[in-house]
Image (cartoon, rainbow, N blue to C red):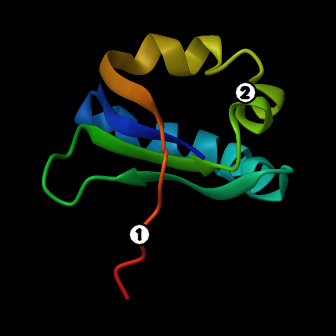
């Protein structure tokens, strides 16, 4: 399993348009083979922060979906980013 997690920072006034542009990406990802979870959401406290969380069955599934990444317009809105991939060796359900 592969997890992609982190956040990006945009100007507070750019956050809602950025998220609206991402809705179709979330829909596509959730339909993609091997996608277990995919979300791009507004942070509850920081008005310029967008949280990212993805969970994929495999690196191959992630790579098949990933494509070229954010559009030019989205890249222009990003002030900084801290997003990383994590290879999960074992899962332990908490419930």
Per the image, label 1 sits on a secondary structure element best described as: loop
> Does the residue at mark 1 contact the one at mark 2 (Cβ under 8 Å)?
no
- Rounded to the nearest whole Å, what is the CA distance between mark 1 and mark 2? 27 Å
Residue at x 71% of width, y 34% of height = 62
Front residue of this view, candidates 67 and 59: 59
Residue 4 horizontal/vertical position (percent): 48, 38
Q: Residue at x 23, y 37 (%)?
A: 48
Quadrant containing the C terminus in the rendered view? bottom left
Residue sitting farthest toward the bottom: 95
Residue named by callout 1: 92
Left or right: residue 11 versus residue 51 is left
Which residue corresponds to mark 2?
A: 66
Q: Residue 74, image x and y in percent?
A: 53, 22
Give the farthest residue toward the front: 90
Q: Which of 18 and 35 lies nearest the eye of the viewer?
A: 35
Q: Earlier in the sequence, mark 1 or mark 2?
A: 2
Q: Residues within 10 Å of mark 1 (few under 14, many from 20)?
A: few
Quadrant in the rendering for residue 5: top left
Query: Residue placed at 65% from the left, 51% from the top?
Result: 23
With respect to residue 72, does 16 lie above or below? below
């Amino acid at each position: 399993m592969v997890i992609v997690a982190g956040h990006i920072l945009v100007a507070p006034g750019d956050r809602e348009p950025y998220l609206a542009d991402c809705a179709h990406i979330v829909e596509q990802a959730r339909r993609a083979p091997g996608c277990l979870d995919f979300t791009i959401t507004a942070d509850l406290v920081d008005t310029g922060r967008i949280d990212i969380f993805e969970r994929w069955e495999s690196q191959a599934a992630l790579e098949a979906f990933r494509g070229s990444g954010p559009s030019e317009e989205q890249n222009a809105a990003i002030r900084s980013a801290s997003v990383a991939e994590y290879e999960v060796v074992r899962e332990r359900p908490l419930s």
